[in-house]
Amino acid sequence: MARRVVEHRALSKDREELVVITVYEEGLNKERIRKDSIFSKKHAVLVKRGGKYDWK
């Protein structure tokens, strides 16, 4: 089962740029994640291989 990874940028209270990376649980589809994170432009997939996750 694959896990989806989403990246977006935000500003802190001190006006510093932050990179926010969210790793979603297995089983969520791409359409659901795009609805939840509408500001994210970068989407990636992690695939489980032999007990470890690897980038697809």
Image: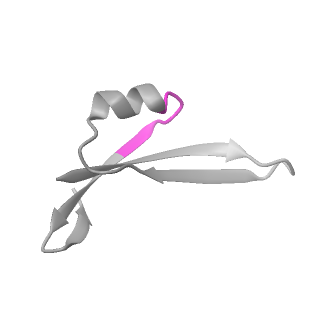
Q: Is residue 21 above or below residue 11?
A: below
When asked about the image quadrant of residue 30, the answer is: top left
The image shows residue 49, relative to residue 46, as above or below, that is: below
Q: Kindly identify the residue that appears in the image at 28 percent across and 52 percent down.
A: 3
Magenta span: predominant SS is loop
The answer to whether residue 8 is left or right of residue 15 is left
Q: Is residue 49 left or right of residue 7?
A: left
In this view, the residue farthest toward the left is 50
Q: Please identify the quarter of the rendering in which residue 48 is found.
A: bottom left
Q: Which residues are magenta?
A: 37-43
**Magenta-span inclusion, residue 50:** no
Instruction: Tell me the residue at 33%/51% (across/down).
Output: 25
Chosen colour scheme: one colour
Q: Position of residue 24 (x, y in %)?
A: 38, 49
Q: Position of residue 42 (x, y in %)?
A: 43, 42
Name above or below for residue 49 compared with residue 5: below
Position above or below: 49 against 38: below
| Nearest to the observer: residue 56 or residue 13 | 13
The structure residue drawn at horizontal position 84% and vertical position 47%, both measured from the top left corner, is 13
Q: Is residue 42 magenta?
A: yes
Q: Position of residue 31 (x, y in %)?
A: 31, 27
Q: Is residue 43 left or right of residue 3?
A: right
